[in-house]
Amino acid sequence: MIHILNHKFERIALPIASFLIKTPNHNILFETGPHSSIKELTAELARHSLEIKDIDQVFLTHIHLDHAGAAWVFAEQGAKIYVHPKGYKHLADPSRLMESARRIYQDMMDMLWGEMHPIPENQLHILNDHEEFTFDDITIKTHFTPGHAVHHAAFQIGDELIAGDVAGVKEEGAPSVIPCPPPDIHIEDWLASIERLRTLNLKAVYVTHFGKVSPVEQHLDEIEFLLKDWSEWIRPYVEKEVPPKELIKPMQAYILEQLKERGISEDKLTTYEFRNPTSANVFGLYRYWKRKLEFEKKK
Ligand SMILES: [Zn+2]
């Protein structure tokens, strides 16, 4: 059974989850959330009669701070940390990751995300694609799922999947959106990852922002539509070399209109912008097209 732990992350109205599986001899955590909400996570673990030191295995879908920022806290208490080979070096030495985050978030950095300390290499397990791990009665299967980040993995347990961000952001009763921050966004890779998820015949996916989503097929259709639609919206502007800053307002208007059409209530619109800021999506999608168009020119 997969338990959802709520970080009650109200700083930017972004709901963040961790997921817990208890087996007779192991306590397995997926996603640690950021260091800034470790108190809330500790309280959630306590509801399951657990402390940080009781978690012996930590699986990370990717190393963005809202997913992996507190991994070092669990490592300090002895946990083994499972991470994609392209994210591994940032956990062993988080200085560059933290520097670039500080450039973006500036003096909000500590309040939003907190600290990140290096994790000793002997506690890091570098994942392989398709790798399987058995703990008592459960088996966890690794699926590399790039697109949102090059270092993204999802974890299958039976017919359920811990999806991180590859299956988008989805809250009950509200339309889903796709988080497209720079620098890694890659639409073809992301679509291929969605196709891979379709082959698994899943009954449910667990998205970090936020919770259990089913039926899966219909949800994946929606994510696929948004990936194509948002990236095609921005493409002509990149071709005309309109500066990305000028696209934030028009894309905001486009997405809000689309959210209304998809049935979101007026009062929820502003929180959506907080949750998945259009500025980040513009820069992420712009960078994707710019690299792609330059590459095609060179051919
Ligand atoms: Zn992410």
Image (cartoon, rainbow, N blue to C red):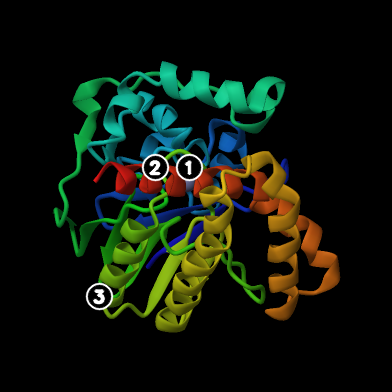
| Above or below, 273 relative to 73 | below
Label 3 vs 2, first from the N-terminus: 3
Q: Residue at x 56, y 35 (%)?
A: 38
Amino acid, disc 3: Leu
Q: Residue at x 58, y 49 (%)?
A: 281
Looking at the picture, which amino acid does disc 2 mark?
Arg
Badge 1 crowding class, 10 Å Cα cut-off, few under 14, some 14 to 19, many 20 or more, is many
Q: Residues within 10 Å of mark 3 (few under 14, many from 20)?
A: few
Residue on which the image places disc 2? 291
Does residue 211 appear left or right of residue 158 in this picture? Answer: right
Residue drawn at (78%, 63%) of the image? 269
Ligand 1 is within 8 Å of the C-beta of the residue at disc 2: no
**Element type where label 3 sits in the image:** loop
Query: Secondary structure beneath disc 1?
Result: helix
Query: What residue is drawn where x is 15% and y is 47%?
Result: 128
For label 2, the crowd category at 10 Å Cα-Cα, with few meaning under 14, some 14 to 19 and many 20 or more, is few
Using residue 195 as the reference point, say whether residue 17 is left or right of it: right
Say which residue label 1 marks. 287
Q: Are marks 1 and 2 in contact (CB under 8 Å)?
A: yes
Q: Nearer the viewer, residue 127 or 54?
A: 127
Residue 277, visible in the rendered structure: no
Is label 3 or label 1 in front?
1
**Label 3 with label 1: CB-CB less than 8 Å:** no
Tell me the quarter of the picture where residue 157 sits: bottom left
Quadrant location, the N terminus: bottom left
Of the numbered discs 3 and 1, the one sitting upstream in the chain is 3
> SS at mark 2?
helix
Question: Where does label 3 land, which residue?
Answer: 200
| Cα–Cα gap, marks 1 and 2 | 6 Å
